[in-house]
Image (cartoon, helix red, strand yellow):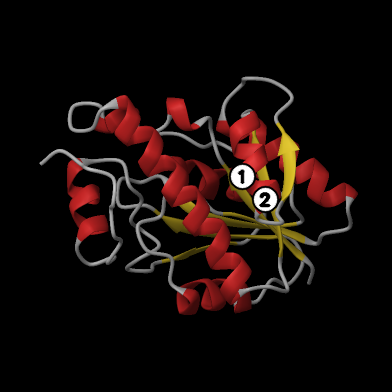
Amino acid sequence: MRTNVVVPIKDFGCAKQRLSGLLSERQRRWLARQLAERTLRFFARWFPWLHVLVVTPSAEVAELASTLGVSVLREAGTDGLSAAVAQAAAWSAAHGFDSQLVIPADIGRLDADEIAVLLRHPRPGPSVILCAARDGGTNALLTTPPAAIAFAFGERSSEAHRKAAQRRGIPCTVLCFPHLSIDIDTTRDLSYLRGRARVVLAEPIAS
């Protein structure tokens, strides 16, 4: 199956608002950019045969993605993540992709083995495969075909996506991975990024 990897990336200046009590705006922008670049380089290194599409409203993000050889889809509006992913799904289908894998740009540690297991999971006909975040969000969403369900990103979105599949009679598999379940949104997550993820934060980060 041809799978399009979609990485939604918001404007760096609007990212990581939940860390505003710990990091300055400059630090949050820097962190968001480093995580985004690391995500795109990860797929280029470990899965070079996969097509990667960044969907973003930001000219800065679009320039970064283009510099790294990644396709870019500029968001048509400002209706949020679900609308952006739906726009990407339409693009994926129009370009002949059987499946779409949505991966956030802020996973604490992307593990090639975890992604490989996710991609190898059987996809007979329409299907949904997801990995839930620790807070109940969705940290990976593999849909076959790309627009198999209505997207419902936000609070407790993993359950919302499971129910969306159920309503359409589409099999939904929930996979649990130790690394893919952790995105960088809280102080606890930032500690994980510094420690177990072994990410060097060269920019001064407040303690």
- Residue 120 location (% of width, % of height): 61, 79
Identify which residue, 87 or 166, lies in the foreground.
87
Q: Secondary structure at mark 1?
A: helix
State the residue at coordinates (43%, 49%): 34
Residue 19 on image: x %, y %? 26, 33
Name the residue rendered at 78%, 72% in the picture. 1
Residue at 70% from the left image edge and 54% from the top image edge: 70
Left or right of 67 in this view: 22: left
x then y, percent, for residue 65? 65, 48
Quarter of the picture holding the C terminus: top left
Q: Are marks 2 and 1 in contact (CB under 8 Å)?
A: yes
Whether residue 3 is situated above or below residue 72 in the rendered picture: below
Residue behind mark 2: 67
Q: Quadrant of residue 30?
A: top left
Say which mark, if any, is on residue 174: none
Q: Nearer the viewer, residue 140 or 187?
A: 187
- Looking at the rendered structure, the secondary structure element under dot 2 is helix
Is the residue 41 above or below the residue 119 in the image? above
Q: Which residue is mark 1?
A: 64
Q: Does 108 sit left or right of 83 as displayed?
A: left
Is residue 178 shown left or right of residue 11?
left
**Amino acid residing under circle 2:** Thr
Q: Residue furthest top?
A: 78
